[in-house]
Image: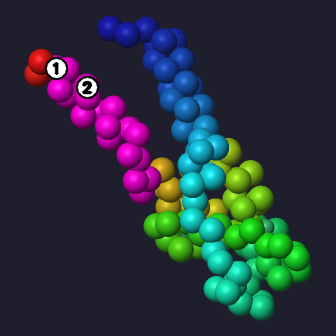
Amino acid sequence: MIPVSLQQEWMEQMEQADKKGCSESFIESLPRVPLSKIKKDDNCPICCCTYEEDDHPLVAELPHCGHRFDVECISVWLSKSTSCPLCRDDVMSHKLGIDTSQVELEEDWGMFG
Ligand SMILES: [Zn+2]
Ligand SMILES: [Zn+2]
């Protein structure tokens, strides 16, 4: 039997882990939208500013759902959350994740060796 107090501690830790956002490198690896693809009235859903208001707009596109945000805004958001602010899709579940898959492979090999 696991003491209830310990279970609660785990739950709290898991909740906190959930709240941890994406890594900086993941945020930086988000595809940037070229200026030519930004329409005049396109705006960032987070700050509601049109991208064109900025002289040098940096716009990031989430790979799975195609929603676009200021790089600045989505960086702040993803540092605290792993879901798209608009559709709530988990961006980490769509991560191509070359790093992690390689680590898993190596672990498998280790088990058989
Ligand atoms: Zn914004
Ligand atoms: Zn989305």
Query: Which of these two is toward me, 89 or 104?
Result: 104
Q: Within the image, what quadrant is residue 68 found in?
A: bottom right
> Is residue 93 something that shows in the picture?
no
Query: Which of these two is toward me, 92 or 55?
Result: 55
> Is residue 110 something that shows in the picture?
yes
Residue 73 higher or lower than 38, as above or below: above
Residue 89: % across, % down: 50, 61
What type of secondary structure mainly makes up the magenta span? helix
**Outermost residue, left direction?**
112
Range of residues picked out in magenta = 93-111
Residue type indicated by callout 1: Met
Left or right of residue 103: residue 52: right
Q: Quadrant of ligand 2?
A: bottom right
Task: Name the residue at 16% across, 20% down.
Answer: 111
* Residue ID for mark 1: 111
Quadrant holding the N terminus? top left
Residue 56: % across, % down: 83, 73
Task: Name the residue at 63% across, 74% down.
Answer: 33
Task: Name the residue at 76% across, 80% down.
Answer: 43
Residue type indicated by callout 2: Glu
Label pair 2/1, CB-CB below 8 angstroms: yes
* Residue ID for mark 2: 107
Disc 2 crowd rating (10 Å Cα; few below 14, some 14-19, many 20+) is few
Distance of label 2 from label 1 (alpha carbons): 6 Å
Which circle marks residue 63 in the picture?
none
Task: Name the residue at 77% across, 91% down.
Answer: 40
